[in-house]
Amino acid sequence: LDRPMTVTVVPSGTAPFANAKATGTVTVTAGGKELARAIVSNTNTITFPVYLQALGANPYVITYSGDSNFLPQTVNGSVFVTLGRITITGGLERSPVPGTYTLTVRATGSPAVAPTGTLSIMNGGTEIAKVTLVPSGGGISTAHATLTNLPASPTLTINYAGDAFYQSGTQQLRVVETRQHSARH
């Protein structure tokens, strides 16, 4: 789910009498929904990603609109989509209060479907918090928490249980030291 199907359009034909190259629109649909569109305007090869939005077999249709010199064309196919993997990134920032940190987590999946669910925050073998992923657009979800009573340099483990579209995953986070600059006047 998190990896696109790549569509490549090679407008290599030349109209026999007009000596024209193909122009027009290429559209990709699946499940009755348009997923991507590209404009053919010269002989350059066009390559673009298409993110499918359902698990299992996904029949798709690639349609070329045609133009005054070239007839429309349609290509039908199917691709099998499995659970995706998310990328977990984040930071743990020390607050002025000893033992207190601000946790920010970003979970990135497919641009078509953002990860959802709950993250379990572990300090060693102890769960210290559960936070919910909130979709923020573009296949990205975020979670925030204030954590207290932690050691001076904690290393936390973020466990993601997965959801209907994504596999489970784990990531470790450490303290992000904010840099301070001083200047003399």
Image (cartoon, helix red, strand yellow):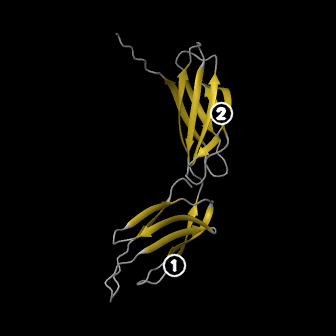
Q: Which residue is drawn at 40% across and 66% down?
A: 46
Q: Vertical placement of 78 versus 121: above or below?
A: below
- Residue 114, given in percent of the width and then of the height, sits at 61, 48
Q: Which amino acid does label 2 sit on?
A: Ser
Q: What residue type is labelled 1?
A: Thr
Quadrant including the N terminus: bottom right
Tell me whether the residue at label 2 lies in contact with that at label 1, contact meaning CB atoms closer than 8 angstroms.
Answer: no
Question: Would you call the spot at circle 1 few (<14 residues within 10 Å), some (14-19), or many (20 or more)?
Answer: few
In the rendered image, the residue lying farthest to the front is 185
Closer mark to the observer between disc 2 and disc 1: 1
Q: Residue 120 carries which label?
A: 2
Q: Vertical placement of 74 versus 27: above or below?
A: below
Quadrant including the C terminus: top left
In the rendered image, the residue lying farthest to the top is 185
Which of the pair 121/177 is nearer the observer?
177
Query: Horizontally, is 19 left or right of 62 in the view?
Result: left
Q: Residue at x 61, y 52 (%)?
A: 113
Q: Vertical placement of 5 versus 165: above or below?
A: below
Q: Vertical placement of 51 versus 67: above or below?
A: above
Q: Tell me the SS state at disc 2.
A: strand
Query: Horizontally, is 181 left or right of 90 in the view?
Result: left
Which of the pair 39/96 is nearer the observer?
39
Query: Horizontally, is 18 left or right of 105 in the view?
Result: left
- Residue 28, given in percent of the width and then of the height, sits at 53, 68
Cα gap from disc 2 to disc 1, whole angstroms: 47 Å
- Residue 138, given in percent of the width and then of the height, sits at 56, 49
The residue where tag 1 is placed is 74
- Residue 176, given in percent of the width and then of the height, sits at 49, 24
